[in-house]
Amino acid sequence: MNEDPPDDEPENDEPSLLSDEPTMELILRAKAGDNAALDAVVQRCLPPLRQWARGRLPSYARGEVDTEDLVQQAVTNVLVRLDRFQPTHVGAMQAYLRQSVINDIRSRIRVVTRRTLVELPDDLGSGEASPEERAISADSYDRYRHALATLRVRDRELIIARVESQWTIGEAAERFGYKSENSARMAVTRAIRRLRAAMATQT
């Protein structure tokens, strides 16, 4: 049986996330009043949401607000209503936040243009889950959570960063200290492969 070649270990061994726990677990702790868990949720949500939302609000609909305002408002709204948020799958928080931003953009465009939703920009996008999220969501969350716990810390962090926080490969390479994006991509691929193998052993 062929084994993976040794990982191209990053130069930086310092933790790159406030927590390597699944986002759903952090949300449950935050709902129970754990401020550290709440900080970790915000740290995961803001950067990928900013990147995804950048440029999606048309200039003619901005007025006195910009995309960053919409992002901040979406996160604030979720935190205020956190006790009512029920995560049901991997990536649920990011999908919810994206949909919140999309809804706000649509409202602003309707006010400005007085047109129907079919007049929205073609590249507005949606709050749908990423391919990585869909691949993992096909299995039960419990299997994902238990399998994730069996992996080494770096693999857990890579999976959390790429799948749940939706970092780009470039961000993962920079923040985890890999020498190149290709090295980071290979590390993420191997981590997800190990996760799937761990999930497959569960009955």
Image (spheres, helix red, strand yellow):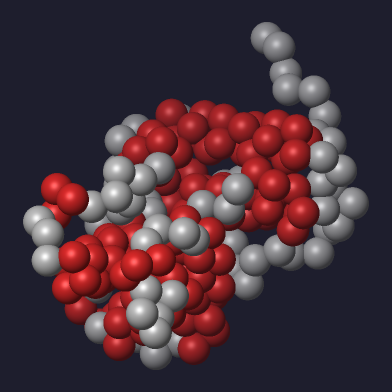
Residue drawn at 21 percent across, 71 percent down: 112
Q: Nearer the viewer, residue 147 or 83?
A: 83
- Foreground of the two, 201 or 17: 17
In the rendered view, tell whether residue 126 sits above or below residue 50.
above
Q: Is residue 142 left or right of residue 164?
A: left
Classify the position of the N terminus by image quarter: top right
Q: Is residue 198 above or below residue 47?
A: above
Give the image quarter of residue 160: bottom right
Q: Position of residue 79 (x, y in %)?
A: 35, 83
Residue projecting furthest to the right:
11
Q: Residue at x 12, y 59 (%)?
A: 115
Image coordinates of residue 68 in percent, x first then y, are 47, 75
Classify the position of the C terminus by image quarter.
top left
Residue 191 visible within the image: yes
Q: Is residue 160 visible?
A: no
**Residue at screen point 59% across, 62% down:** 20
Residue sitting at x 57%, y 30%: 193
Residue closest to the eye, 181 or 103:
103
Relative to 29, residue 19 above or below? above
Residue 184 percent coordinates (x, y): 73, 40
Q: Taking 137 as reference, is 201 left or right?
A: right
Location of residue 17 by image quarter: bottom right
Look at the picture and state if 125 lies above or below 182: below
x, y (%) of residue 28?
35, 74
